[in-house]
Image (cartoon, rainbow, N blue to C red):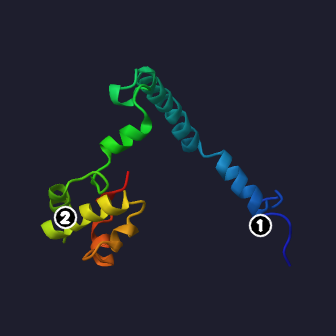
Amino acid sequence: MLSNTHPRSSRPRSSAVERSFKSSRSAPFQRCARSRRRPLLSAMLLLAAPLALQPLPPAMAQDTPPAELAEASAPGININTASAAELAEALSGVGGARAEAIVRYREQFGPFESIEELGEVSGIGSATIERNRAVIRIR
């Protein structure tokens, strides 16, 4: 028969929850680790504060609209403004004749409104569009 006291002492047994609570409170190394983190965090915040207060670089200034920044920094080629030579050089699987066809289509029907519309050009298929999707820009 189980008794409510420890076999070697007259003290009552403690439950598993009480034991885990006691062991977490009595672990001195956990308090030390936390106390070492606070000064480190404070030092990092003090070092980062001057960076947040610096003025923005000229490219990020408010006088340049965000759309122009995106166009200037976006990699690729705008198929609505590029010449046939630029298209032939930038697009994989598109030579001079296909590039001329793209320019003719653009002159005849106006600017492309989607990348998929490029598939309407004779000789440009879905495989060519998918191969160059990361390079092609519309705006």
- Where residue 58 appears, as percent x and y from the top left, is 34, 25
**Residue 92 visible from this viewpoint:** no
- Per the image, label 2 sits on a secondary structure element best described as helix
Between residue 43 and residue 129, name the one nearer to us: 129
- On screen, 53 above or below 125? above
How many numbered markers are drawn?
2
Kindly identify the amino acid type of the residue bearing the numbered disc 1. Answer: Pro
- Where residue 32 appears, as percent x and y from the top left, is 53, 37
- Where residue 61 appears, as percent x and y from the top left, is 40, 26
Give the quarter of the image for residue 62: top left
Between residue 96 and residue 8, name the one nearer to us: 96
User: Which residue carries the number 1 mark?
Assistant: 7
Which label is found at residue 135? none
Q: Residue at 66% across / 52% down in the picture?
A: 23
Q: Are marks 1 and 2 in contact (CB under 8 Å)?
A: no
Left or right: 107 as drawn, with respect to 25: left
Kindly identify the amino acid type of the residue bearing the numbered disc 2. Answer: Glu
Left or right: 118 as drawn, with respect to 99: right
Quarter that holds the N terminus: bottom right
- Per the image, label 1 sits on a secondary structure element best described as loop
Query: Viewer-nearest of labels 1 and 2?
Result: 2
- Disc 1 packing (10 Å; few <14; some 14–19; many ≥20): few
Q: Residue at 30% across / 72% down in the picture?
A: 121
Between residue 67 and residue 101, name the one nearer to us: 101
Give the quarter of the image for residue 63: top left
**Residue 10 visible from this viewpoint:** yes
User: Which residue carries the number 2 mark?
Assistant: 100
